[in-house]
């Protein structure tokens, strides 16, 4: 099963696609969706939507997960992050996928084992869990971590009788 992980941001959103086969995970692709900070907000959000649609079309994931918004000290930054996240959730839903949503602490706990892990620890574990991966920056590494977290949760849900 292909799983798309997304780390939303207005300036840069990370994305990563992994393949989950039972307990085995492998890297498929990762990257960053960047918007022009000089462009009007609506144009930036539309561009983000177009880039996400291309990724969804190229990889046709069966599942997707998005990191939840955290509250910044700057309310404007939090609002812009929320708007970018809304565009991402809409794009995933438009593709017919019900996205998983995970808090950053839960992603860190799933990948590293502790919810207060540093970014460097998360990135090191992503490289360990996906041997040979060449990560396209920290946003892409975070997105791959979100995908790994979702893969673990999906595997757990399959093991627990419903």
Image (tube, rainbow, N blue to C red):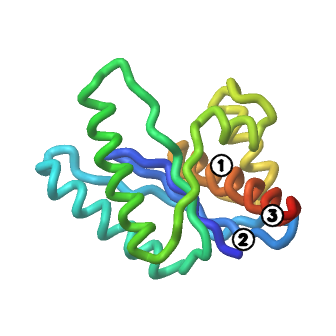
Instruction: Please tell me which of labels 1 and 2 falls first in the chain.
Output: 2
Q: Is residue 96 above or below residue 137?
A: below
Q: Is residue 96 above or below residue 78?
A: below
Q: Residue at the location (47% across, 76% down)?
A: 96
Q: Is residue 81 above or below residue 86?
A: above
Tell me which corner region of the image, top left, top right, bottom left or bottom right, holds residue 120.
top right
Instruction: For label 1, count other residues whose C-alpha is less than 10 Å away and answer few (under 14), some (14-19) or many (20+).
Output: many
Q: Are marks 3 and 1 in contact (CB under 8 Å)?
A: no
Furthest residue to the front? Answer: 162
The x, y position of residue 11, in whole percent, is 32, 45
Disc 3 vs disc 1: which is toward the camera?
3
The x, y position of residue 61, in whole percent, is 58, 75
Q: CA distance from mark 3 to mark 1?
A: 26 Å
Residue holding disc 2:
19
Secondary structure found at label 3: loop
Left or right: residue 143 compared with residue 72: right
Residue holding disc 3:
162
Q: Are marks 3 and 2 in contact (CB under 8 Å)?
A: no
Secondary structure found at label 2: strand
Instruction: For label 2, count other residues whose C-alpha is less than 10 Å away and answer few (under 14), some (14-19) or many (20+).
Output: many
Residue holding disc 1:
145
Tell me which corner region of the image, top left, top right, bottom left or bottom right, holds residue 24.
bottom right
Quarter the C terminus occupies: bottom right
Left or right: residue 155 compared with residue 101: right
The x, y position of residue 86, in whole percent, is 34, 53
Q: Residue at the location (82% across, 57% down)?
A: 156
Instruction: For label 3, count other residues whose C-alpha is less than 10 Å away and answer few (under 14), some (14-19) or many (20+).
Output: few
């Amino acid at each position: 099963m292909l799983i798309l992980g997304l780390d939303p941001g207005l300036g840069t959103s990370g994305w990563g696609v992994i393949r989950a086969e039972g307990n085995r995970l492998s890297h498929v692709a990762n990257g960053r969706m960047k918007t022009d900070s000089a462009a009007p907000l609506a144009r930036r959000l539309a561009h983000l939507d177009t880039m996400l649609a291309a990724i969804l079309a190229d990889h046709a994931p069966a599942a997707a997960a998005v990191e939840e918004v955290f509250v910044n000290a700057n309310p404007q930054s939090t609002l812009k992050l929320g708007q970018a996240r809304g565009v991402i959730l809409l794009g995933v839903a438009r593709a017919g996928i019900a996205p998983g949503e995970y808090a950053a602490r839960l992603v860190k706990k799933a990948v590293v084992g502790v919810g207060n892990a540093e970014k460097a620890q998360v990135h090191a574990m992503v490289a360990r869990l996906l041997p040979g991966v060449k990560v396209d920056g920290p946003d892409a590494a975070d997105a791959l971590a979100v995908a790994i977290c979702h893969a673990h949760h999906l595997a757990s849900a399959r093991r627990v009788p419903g």
